[in-house]
Image (tube, helix red, strand yellow):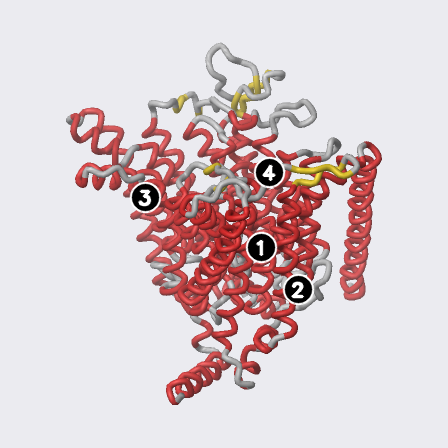
Amino acid sequence: MAETTKAAAPAHTENSNKKWAIGFLTVVLAIYAINKFYIPTAPAQVKTFFNAWFSLTSMGEIMIYILMALGLNIVVGYAGLLDLGYVAFWALGGYVAGWLMSGQFDQWQINFFGNPPAGLPNGIHLNFLLVLVLGGVFTAIWGVIIGAPTLRLKSDYLALVTLGFGEIIPQIMVNGEDIGGFNLTNGTKGINPVDNIKLFGHEFGPFQLADKFLIYASLAGLMIFFSLRLRDGRLGRAWLAIREDELAASMMGVPLMRTKLASYAVGATAGGVGGVAFATLIGGVYAERFNFQVSIIILSMVVLGGMGNVWGVLVGATLLAWVNNTGLVQFGNIINSATGKNIDFPSFNFLIFGVLLILMMLYRREGFLPEARVRLIMHEEEFSDVAVVTDDIEVEGVHHHEHN
Amino acid sequence: MTSTTARAPRASVNVSKLLTRISMALIAVVVIYWLGRNFLDSPTQFLSVGITGLSNGALYALIALGYTLVYGIIELINFAHGDLFMLGAVFSYFFLTSFLGAEGASAGNYAKLGLTLVLAMTFCASLNVLIERLAYRRLRDAPKLAPLITAVGVSFVLQFIGLKWNGSAPRNFTTVLPQTSFTVHGVVVPWNALAIISLTIPLLLILVTLVNKTKQGRAMRATAQDKDAARLMGIDVNKTISFTFALGGAMAGAAGLMFAQSVGTVAYNIGFQLGLIAFTSAVLGGVGNLYGAVLGGFLIGVIQGFNDGLPFGPGQKWSQTVVFTILILLMVYRPAGLLGKATTEKV
């Protein structure tokens, strides 16, 4: 059966995938080359421009957001389960990096191909790659723990429960500096510094940002690859089937719980890996960064680009992450200096993300780069019989009013 | 082979049922031990904390009613409801304290408080109707994901309005309701708790009468049951849904005013947390059930009060965690809530 589906897959999707992949690679390499070879020798003006508008930190952040948005896309876009507490996985991944790549537990002295700062051997210092894997596994386990009891709930209840977890886990991190006398998370002060990444003898310090960017870009690239491969595989098709009609899918023999749990686990893994990566990018883990707003920003990325479409989510994540960390501030500065006012533009992100979500849902539910299938689901009511009947009644009602 | 596969699921169901029972019993034992130990240790403190909890619970009940009314009629979890409550609080501060200049208790200020109550209720009711008209109405037949995400968006927009209106820092002010308290046999009773409870109960009674006894209430119940059938019976479904949103909004406005008056602080971000707590109350009682929302509100208020105020317990810094743990446990063990009826999703 798998073979027939494979054969039936239209050739153009594979082609367009290839085009996108080449495009992604080109952009990443171009950013790397510009920053590695051109910027250091460029005139000061160019340097400040790039620093302000396209700083490497923000580029790395965009890559991590792509990774996480694609992870959420598997839960929301593929399996159709609304998760409003995705930030919990980010937090858990971040703290895995904080625990295993820093001096947080200075009562121990463990170094496994790690990179402790010079002269500070205390704490646990594992290799970055190992921490990535451990972070992914740890959050996947948490994904299953959160998912197992809650996935049989109705979709809107599920959203609330995930939201609850998204609130509880950061609160545990905030309060976790004294759990029975044990300092687990260092409270609001957070865990810092997190070790620099060291791979194959090469250290990625705070000044090797271009090289660091390449690491994050390859993580994002891997996630794109996994997303595309998973989607066309057995599991991916099961997810899509559940998203489109749970009952029909279970009639066709799709094991609902196991499939939903798998989507949770994969989504959580991406969140955890993203959390580890983000901790190394900013060199620390801070509990107050993990708030509800982050969950919503990542959700907006998925919604804006087009739920279920990898390339749509990629574009959405790039755009919104950039607007959120750079664009809003920079445009604000320009407008402020042109008008002589002092408007706090970053505070407008509430408005921007809120209005964006509302307008998208009202006018373009399928996102800007939609999949044909998603577009059909999102406008299902327009084709169903019940809707047609209600529409007729609506029209009658309107006439009635006019006569009165 | 077939017989084993057929038997396997039944065994697993029994095991999970047993596990559910055992874990429920364990939770009950822990809670009873916790309450009992605290009560025996200091009964007066136990009761004082309980009274504060009841007055918070009254506020939760008012907000929870908004969730429950809206969920009952269009099956939407209105995420923005908590932020509507926040705007009610901010409005009451700006009207009562800033515009009317009412600070401290006096007869004239109580009259102003009454006026503000009516205006805050009207303000939130109109806003809620407007939100429904602009955002939710068009999505009534859309897949469930769409209105939910829209509600999250509305919540953000309302928070933005609150942020720009109230400023990013919390605002402290002198309340009209007295911040003093009296003691009965060592039990501390704050005056504002008493005021809140005595303002809330009539509101709740009016609402319940409205829904159960009036023609408009019957229209609401009919619409909740079956929109198409209601329409065929001559009920204006859109108007009925708007009315429901207005009712929920009015309750949120009243709660906002009383919250502002009881704590003397307003901030743009109070809506999210309190809204979630109120939603938990609605779920605890059984979403869609009015009495359930009230019961759930008082229960959550008291539980939170005990958690925050009793010597043996997790303490205030775990307040949210305790409430959301209740939410999650409920969802797992009894999604229908205490008074709700278990329903299956319509196919």
Q: CA distance from mark 4 to mark 1?
A: 23 Å
- Closer to the N terminus: mark 4 or mark 1? 1
User: Are labels 2 and 1 assigned to the same chain?
Assistant: yes
Whether residue A28 can be seen here: no
Residue located at (56% from left, 37% from top): A170
Of labels 4 and 1, the one closer to you = 4
Q: Which residue is mark 2?
A: B289
Amino acid beneath label 4: Gln
Q: CA distance from mark 2 to mark 1?
A: 13 Å
Judging from the image, mark 1 belongs to the subunit labelled B
- Closer to the N terminus: mark 2 or mark 1? 1
Q: Which residue is mark 3?
A: A323
- The image position of residue A161, as x and y in percent, is 60, 51
Judging from the image, mark 2 belongs to the subunit labelled B
Amino acid beneath label 3: Val
Snapshot quadrant of residue A373: bottom left
User: Are labels 3 and 4 assigned to the same chain?
Assistant: no
Q: Provide the secondary structure element on which disc 3 rests.
A: helix
Q: Which residue is mark 1?
A: B63
Q: Which residue is mark 4?
A: B179
Q: Residue furthest front?
A: B107
- The image position of residue B62, as x and y in percent, is 60, 56
Q: CA distance from mark 3 to mark 4?
A: 45 Å
